[in-house]
Image (cartoon, grey):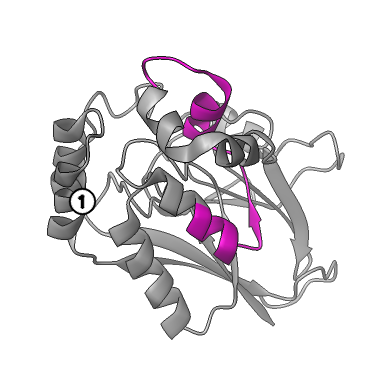
Amino acid sequence: MERIAILSDIHGNMTALRAVLKDIEQRGLKHLICLGDLAGKGPGPAEAVDMITDRCRAVVRGNWDHAIAMHASEFTLWHRAQLGKKRLSYLRELPIYLEFYMSGRLIRLCHAAPHDMFYRTFQDSEQTKRLKLFEPTETLNLYSDIVGYGDIHMAYIDHISGRTVFNAGSVGNPLDITQASYAVIEGEYGAKELSPFSLSLIRVPYDIDKAVDDALKSDMPEKDAYINELRTAIYRGNVHKEVK
């Protein structure tokens, strides 16, 4: 049996990332996958990219990673300056999704959806919209059994028409409760024959005051909005707004 930790939405919050990695180490988890949004919002984008690159088996591109790496604008200027050319190139080359079998289940992992990193779904989204998450991809013309994603910063596990969807939540910018989140899947990696499988969500308290202090000491943009999100887990705009 193999156990894989699935992280998402670091958003440059190194205090939260270190707390999650410590918890992962204490649980003896050796394999990590990140579902994107390494950078953006928080004060440590370069450190987050470096640490995720070093620790994770695979990484997919998030919408913030895409915006920062692909577009030089007032919105992305500070984050691009922190990252530098090499890290921006790394973010541009990240895949949109990963897929593999585990204990007889076809699993797809992505930032928002396997076919579109900007396709946003919530647990209360209409079922027809959520079922699109399982649709075949260009590389494998099969519906998936399990889809795991990030993007909305709200951790959950749900079942739709006999299939499973889960959200790993956010490491660095949770918007459900003020604790970092990640998921763990366990089973026979690569096996197409059905066998026992488990999926769980882990919540990790971290030093929010330290994360706030890191932001205050930086010259990052939109400090007040970021700090308020860390302290309250309330999104700065409408919770179903297009960009998180």
Residue interval drawn in magenta: 50-75
Q: Identify the residue shown where x is 25% and y is 28%.
A: 221
Q: Is residue 16 visible?
A: yes
- Within the magenta stretch, is there residue 56? yes
Q: Where residue 18 sits in the image (x, y, percent)?
A: 36, 66
For image coordinates 59% across by 77% down, the residue present is 30
Q: 31 or 150: which is nearer to us?
A: 31
Q: Position of residue 132 (x, y in %)?
A: 65, 32
User: Is 101 placed left or right of 4 in the picture?
Assistant: right
Query: Based on the displayed image, in which of its 4 quarters is residue 101 positioned?
Result: bottom right
Residue 152 picture location, percent across and down: 41, 38
The residue furthest top is: 73
Residue at 27%, 48% (x, y): give it.
Answer: 176
Look at the image and tell me whether residue 120 can be seen.
no
Q: Which residue is mark 1?
A: 214
Q: Give the structural element (helix, strand or loop) at label 1.
A: helix
Horizontal side, residue 121 vs residue 96: left or right: left
Where does the image place residue 116, in percent across and percent down from the top left? Answer: 63, 28
Name the image quarter holding the N terminus: bottom right
Q: Give the total of numbered labels.
A: 1
Mark 1 surroundings within 10 Å by alpha-carbon count, few (fewer than 14), some (14 through 19), many (20 or more) = some
- In the image: residue 110, left or right of residue 75: right
**Residue at 47% from the left image edge and 32% from the top image edge:** 64
Quarter of the figure that contains the C terminus = top left
Towards the viewer: 11 or 238: 11
Check the image and report above or below for 176 versus 67.
below
- Per the image, is 52 magenta? yes
The three-letter amino acid code for the residue at tag 1 is Asp
Q: Is residue 178 above or below residue 110?
A: below
